[in-house]
Image: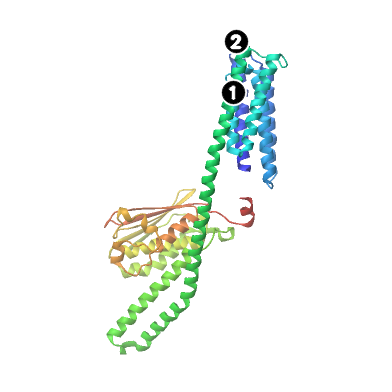
Amino acid sequence: MRTRLDWFNRLRWAAGFGVLAAVLVVGIGFGTPIEVRPLSLTAGVLLLMNLAYVLRSRTMKPTDIKAELLLMKVQMVGDLMVLTILLNLSGGIENPLIFTYVIHVIIASLLFKGRGIFMIACLACALFTAMVAGEYFGWVPHHHLPMMSEATHEGSFIVLYLGSFWLVILFTAYVGARIMRHNRAIKDELVARQKDLIRVDQAKNDFFRYVTHEIKSPVNTAQSAVETAQVLGGNDLPPKVDDMLSRAVRRLRQATDIVKDLADLTRGGDLKKENLDREDLNAVIGRAVELQKGLADSRDIDLRVMLPEPPVIMTTNRSMAEAIASNLIGNALRYCREGGRVSVRLVDTGKLVRLVVEDDGIGIPPEDQERIFEEFYRTAAAQEVSDLGTGLGLAIVRKFVTDLGGRIDVQSELDQGATFTVVLPRRSRAKLASADEEGES
């Protein structure tokens, strides 16, 4: 509601200054005989009222929805009264802008519900009718516009005009109320479905956390036992037994990777302020490259790293940044051809930081370039290269990049390599969750 009030205040600024500009141009610039001083004074009153509303909005925190709603209605009533005075000073029923009342009814339909909309519509009709009747019976002065006909002051014309005015205003209120009621029903349904999706996602994450917690210890124990058996058996193990134990170790390591990836993927909630710090991104990339250097050497891959000087210092989450870099570099090395080339570039553009990881490996077909970010999805070409991947690395990358307020893009052709580009804000725009902020939101 406070956001809507601020939006309403901005509209009022535009209206007030617009009236002042029109009065100066028409009344002074073109010399049209209009009430320049009273019109300017009324517009000034409107701007002063709006200044009071803005100061209140900036100095008082919203605590009561009823108070905000009441203030909004008071503002609407004040605006209608000011509009009526402005119309009276500029021709009354002769003024072609009398249907400006319709704008207020439309705004009321956006802000209020049901009866509140019709109350504003009826108030608009009552004020306009009172002004027209007052001018007709001489209760208030009439400011005639020279270019208008005197026929506008005949009784039959006034009755017909007022009837048309009431019809238009009330019909606008009715249509606005129906449309907004329909929109609110759709919104309520979408909110309910969103809550259901959040509950399902939370249940999935809880399940993954339970699985990772329960599987981690037995997998590590089994891996240690098999590796110990290999060491103790040494050269005395039959070749077939040694091969079976080696394959078991590889599979157990894959299971360990899956457990680790699931833990990363289900890292819960929005980022906290305390989890963000100023980090040297050059150092983060350097550590990720060092961890993957063994894989590059084993496959005879030319791993090139280009980091800017001076180092890129940015506000981010270190573990997320390291996971993004490690997964992208690891994937590039894993799916690059033997003896190929992988380049890692970090580019500082001021407000944005760009990490580019490029390889000349198997590539990704166009139909798979969006699906590779899905959990557990691996392309057919990737499965041919290795059957040990978890299919979670890129899902983790996209999740962390999104959490940090950035985006990730991929450009690739089959058998022509792939280029992954991560763009992050220099200062993280991630959603920071704290008790105060959640309460304010």
Q: Residue furthest right?
A: 139
Q: Rate crowding at label 1 as few (under 14), some (14 to 19) or many (20 or more) other CA atoms within 10 Å.
A: many
Q: Quadrant of the N terminus?
A: top right
Secondary element at image label 1: helix
Residues 297 and 215: in front is: 215
Amino acid bearing label 1: Phe
Residue 97 x %, y % = 58, 21
Which residue is drawn at the image coordinates 41% and 84% (left, top)? 225
Amino acid bearing label 2: Ala
- Picture quadrant where residue 412 is located: bottom left
Is residue 266 visible to us here?
Answer: no
Q: Is residue 3 above or below residue 127?
A: below
Q: Which mark is residue 32?
A: none
Is residue 154 visible to us here?
Answer: yes
Q: Rate crowding at label 2 as few (under 14), some (14 to 19) or many (20 or more) other CA atoms within 10 Å.
A: few
**Disc 2 vs disc 1: Cβ atoms closer than 8 Å?**
no
Residue position for label 1: 165
Residue 108 x %, y % = 60, 35
Q: Which mark is residue 151?
A: 2
Secondary element at image label 2: helix
Residue 233 x %, y % = 35, 88
Q: Is residue 360 above or below residue 350?
A: below
Q: Residue furthest left?
A: 415
- Picture quadrant where residue 360 is located: bottom left
Which residue is drawn at the image coordinates 46% and 58% (left, top)? 399
Residue 338 x %, y % = 27, 65
Q: Whole-Å distance between the Cαs marked 2 and 1? A: 17 Å
Relative to 363, 274 lies left or right: right
Which residue is drawn at the image coordinates 54% and 34% (left, top)? 175
